[in-house]
Amino acid sequence: MENDCLKIIIREMTKDDVPQVSLIEKEAFGDHRWHEGAFYSELDNELSKYLVATLDDGSLVGFIGCWLIFEEAHIATFAISKKYQKKQIAQALICAFVDICYKEEIKYITLEVRESNTPAINLYEKFGMTSVGIRKNYYQDNNENAIIMFSENIFYNKFRAIYNNIKNNINKVNISYE
Ligand SMILES: CC(C)(COP(=O)(O)OP(=O)(O)OC[C@H]1O[C@@H](n2cnc3c(N)ncnc32)[C@H](O)[C@@H]1OP(=O)(O)O)[C@@H](O)C(=O)NCCC(=O)NCCS
């Protein structure tokens, strides 16, 4: 029987990835995006952790960037290439990122998301994250509010159950880690 699972490799981002990351970022965020230089600086920042998802042939299909500060991880930027959305790649990247948080003894995951970004809000809610407040007019391009979201303590059983359930149900992608 043919296996139509998409093969995805998740690994740390390198500076060689930045041009491809920038293309995905531009597609996702248009003019309101980071410039390449910001990614190069981030990769030199010891508080940053950046992961990419690639296909077998090395082409990049998504990335996640976070800052690890004391007991919190802040998701700073995150996107999946449009052609590869809705294939569970975002969930796979978050699971890989949560694994890093466990290793680094990070307790909470937080982020800001546009009020209108239903796909992202649904994704974070799937991981049990909830809204804890609003940053008024946070996004300068259209003055849109940001919703501040926080996870449960990821070491608590409630989060672990959600995380394990998602990990066990990722069936559209066959993930390997480098
Ligand atoms: C948000 C984003 C990262 C999701 O990536 P993805 O790989 O398509 O997501 P997944 O396939 O792993 O889906 C995970 C969950 O996200 C939610 N979701 C994803 N796409 C959705 C959509 N178009 N509409 C509603 N919910 C959606 C669902 O809850 C989904 O779970 P389900 O399949 O059980 O319904 C992607 O849409 C993206 O890159 N958007 C542009 C950039 C962006 O908004 N980044 C986040 C900034 S905070």
Image (cartoon, rainbow, N blue to C red):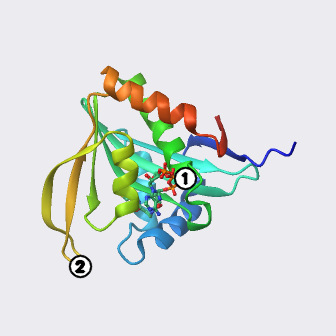
Residue 162 located left or right of residue 84:
left
Residue shown at 60%/57% (left/top)? Answer: 61
Residue 175 located left or right of residue 126:
right
- Residue labelled 1 has its Cβ within 8 Å of some atom of ligand 1: no
Q: Is the residue marked by circle 1 packed among few (<14), some (14-19), or many (20+) residues within 10 Å?
A: some
- From the top left corner, tell me how far across and down residue 131 is, in percent: 20, 49
Q: Amino acid at mark 2?
A: Asn
In the rendered image, the vertical position of residue 137 relative to residue 64, given as above or below: below
Residue shown at 65%/46% (left/top)? Answer: 172
Secondary element at image label 2: loop
**Residue beneath disc 2:** 142
**Residue beneath disc 1:** 15
Label whose residue precedes the other's in the sequence (2 or 1): 1
Identify which residue, 103 or 41, lies in the foreground: 103
The quadrant of the picture occupied by the C terminus is top right
Residue shown at 33%/46% (left/top)? Answer: 125
Number of numbered tags placed on the structure image: 2
Circle nearer the viewer, 2 or 1: 2
